[in-house]
Amino acid sequence: MTMTNDATGTAKKKLGLKERYALMTRGLDWETTYQPMEDVFPYATYEGIKVHDWDKWEDPFRLTMDAYWKYQAEKEQKLYAIMDAFAQNNGHLGLTDARYINALKLFLTGVTPLEYMAHRGFAHVGRQLPGVGARVACQMQSLDELRHAQTQIHSMSNYNKLYDGFHSWRHMHDRVWYLSVPKSFFDDAITAGPFEYMIAIGFSFEYVLTNLLFVPFISGAAYNGDMGAMAFGFSAQSDESRHMTLGLEAIKFMLEQDPDNLPIVQHWIDKWFWRGYRVLTLVAMMLDYMLPKKVMSWKEAWEVYAEQNGGALFADLARYGIRPPLGWQQACDDKDHLSHQAWATFYQYQAAAPFHTWVPSEEDMAWQADKYPDTFDKYYRPRFEQWAQMEAEGNRFNNGTLPLLCQVCQIPMLFTEPGDPTRICYRESEYKGETYHTCSDGCKNIFDHEQEKYIQAWLPVHQIYQGNCFGPDADPTSPDFNPLLEVIKWYGYNVGVDNRPYEGSEDQTNFRAWKQQTTSNAPAAG
Amino acid sequence: MTFELTIEPLGQTVDVEEGQTLLDASLRAGVYLPHACGHGLCGTCKVQVLDGEIDHGPISSFALMDFEREEGLCLACCATAESDITIEADIDDEPDARNLPVRSATAIVTRIENLTPTIKGVWAKVDAPEGLPFQAGQYVNVQLPGGQGHRPFSFAQSPSNPHEIELDVRFVPGGVATTWIHEQLAVGDQLQLAGPYGRFHVRASANQPLLFLAGGSGLSSPRSMILDLVEQGCTLPITLVYGARNRDELYYVDEFTRLATEVPTFTYVPTLSHEPDDSDWTGARGFVHDAAKAHFQGDFRGLKAYLCGPPAMIDACISTLMQGRLFERDIYQELFISAADTARARSPLFKRI
């Protein structure tokens, strides 16, 4: 084979990947003539983001659909081989402890519906953004998210055969109080305009916060013997580089297109950092309290993935005039408190949650004290010790009244004042003669900026008090009417099984019995 | 054991040690490859192996699929070389890069001059008929005496003269190389050279006005580039903003002042950051980025900017340029990546700046 030589005698260079891709995809977008462009892309301008030249969008991945299917097909093949092997070999019996299943319940019921919403969101945004590079990237991410939702549903299905609390995840997502936290987060994003969605999900969530969600979860699965969950975690993470790159390209593009975009983008970063951070409260609790074999503390995870990586990102973004999000410092200060306050809340509301809670063991509390030397023994250990004692006396502490929820993040008012971990933080805003309550300065800022949006929030506790959370057969007039019982029936719980303490639960006794069967000839107990 | 790693489509060849990852070798040689997680999970650093043998290293089977392995792809962040290899990476081809071959040469020092109290000019005649051809903006590695390794110095003369190289060297207190050059090197000594290296060069094909921002001894590359542009008859506006501490540290001021009167498209903006207030200096005062901002009234749109100087100056200039609406695709800087640079936490927001 001979090389083509040009006049100067040097070998003709190969086209770069970028040039080859440009030649293949040129002309995929066009100016419409039958209909005006503003009718074809009705959401492109109302948010105030000015775009002058979509050709400046640098397609970060240059992946063709043909290659995309090939990649994803092989990922699926591998993933399902591992999941099948895990199921067929009773892989669940290799878990450290059935308490781990509760971390899975929280993750799978909380996050799986979000994957599906992300699929819908990117499909919508991919349709509405006028630039072809952005459209193709969103289309692929939309398909990725659908794949993630499916693989997680299949994982859930394996566990649902053996353990409690997974059976009604879709139904619960629309009703259960703490699941309204992730649900409202995504509903908020998907009802925003296309550019805000890209900053909310593509940038803030996928880039700034996703490592705090996935890495602890996948490592937690690995540390606790769950090869199935680890496999879908790896499989999902292999799509993440594309998602992160899309988020980064989106923010750079908006900031470079017009100086007027800067304050709009800055506000979205402030808002979506805080929204995402609040959702991560559940991850903090999972890391520090729910994993039998712990990976790292929430504080350590925050320091690596937020302070270090996020800090480097915001140092670079400063060149555009972007400053770190408003709530950044408070989130850093709260790292010593977040998980302890959250777990204490779930413990108190055990009867209303379809997973099991427990008082941390002495050994676990020693770990907490080691990881949180400034706060655990001082503020949180005494409460757990008190509750342990009450349990021993047969008098487990259950909170029978419903908590006030934050109008924005929908988390019960459980967070403390900045700088004072002994006082609950309450904020109020007046709007059209009504008082609205928020949990923090971050959520109050968000509320005050878009009151009309957040006054429509479907707050589970308000809805219970308004009588909207009972089944058709509930009779509030009957003398033995038990409202909390009726609510959790309406939530779809297997009452008394899903929502009881870990000690003595079916998950605990079954797991113990099944484990025993693997090493002895004794008949199954229970 | 050291192998050669050739990176397409640049055609650049770098050394890779046994056990060193392809990504590490590339970054250390100044070739940026896209990457993110750094440990074989995300797949951002996927490259095609065109020739040679590699070891994939500990990578996730989801980040690099079987069919991709069969097609010869690998993840540069984990792959190590088992022979000389050639890879193709997703990096932009540069139509303006001349891709001159690297060669070794001997040169005899012909002249040493104090350009400022801290910067010496060293001229040396290359002992080869064709001299040491280079592209303006590139650098040469100079072998230190006694096997103490080598140091890079930018060519300061026009590339039309490949026969007598000029290196302008600032004295760094305690620096092995600069101490040797400032205190021991003498006319008649031999220098062992290897070069040219580097991908810092003028993007002439872009056909956009040029802005050079330089500070301290970072004037060498801009000077070589500007002399080259003028010799080539460039008709685009060229601006040089050069910053020094004080009047004594300002060098080649007569040459650039003369050039500015002879070449109507060339503008020279010297600025001094630590000149005594009561001196007779009538030019700009302050740092390079301030002088540039004032000169362009904070609007840098439509330019191509070339940056050369100490890291703090580069960083301030990039922020100023970006806030004046000039972004990464139009900003170029001379990069000598040291171990300290790779240790600094950087986000993947920017690739080259």
Image (cartoon, rainbow, N blue to C red):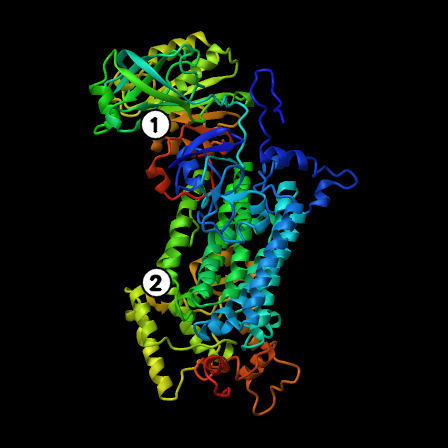
* Location of residue B281 by image quarter: top left
* Location of residue B156 by image quarter: top left
Q: Which of A87 and A422 is in front in this view?
A: A87
Q: Residue lying farthest top?
A: B262
Q: Name the residue type under label 1.
A: Phe
In this rendering, position of residue A339 left or right of residue B59:
left
Say which residue label 1 marks: B287
Mark 2 crowd level (few <14, some 14–19, many ≥20, 10 Å Cα): many
Which residue corresponds to the image point at 43% horizontal and 32% vertical from the top-left?
A: B14
Give the structural element (helix, strand or loop) at label 1.
loop
Q: Nearer the viewer, residue B94 or B346?
A: B94
A233 shown above or below A163 = above
Measured from the top left, where is residue A415 in percent x and y? 40, 66
In this rendering, position of residue B54 left or right of residue A389:
right
A273 shown above or below A228 = above
Say which residue label 2 marks: A336
Q: Nearer the viewer, residue A98 or A343?
A: A98
The quadrant the N terminus of chain A occupies is: top right
Q: Name the residue type under label 2.
A: Asp
Front: mark 1 or 2: 2
A256 shown above or below A264 = above
Measured from the top left, where is residue A124 in percent x and y? 66, 52
Give the structural element (helix, strand or loop) at label 2.
helix
Measured from the top left, where is residue A41 in percent x and y? 69, 45
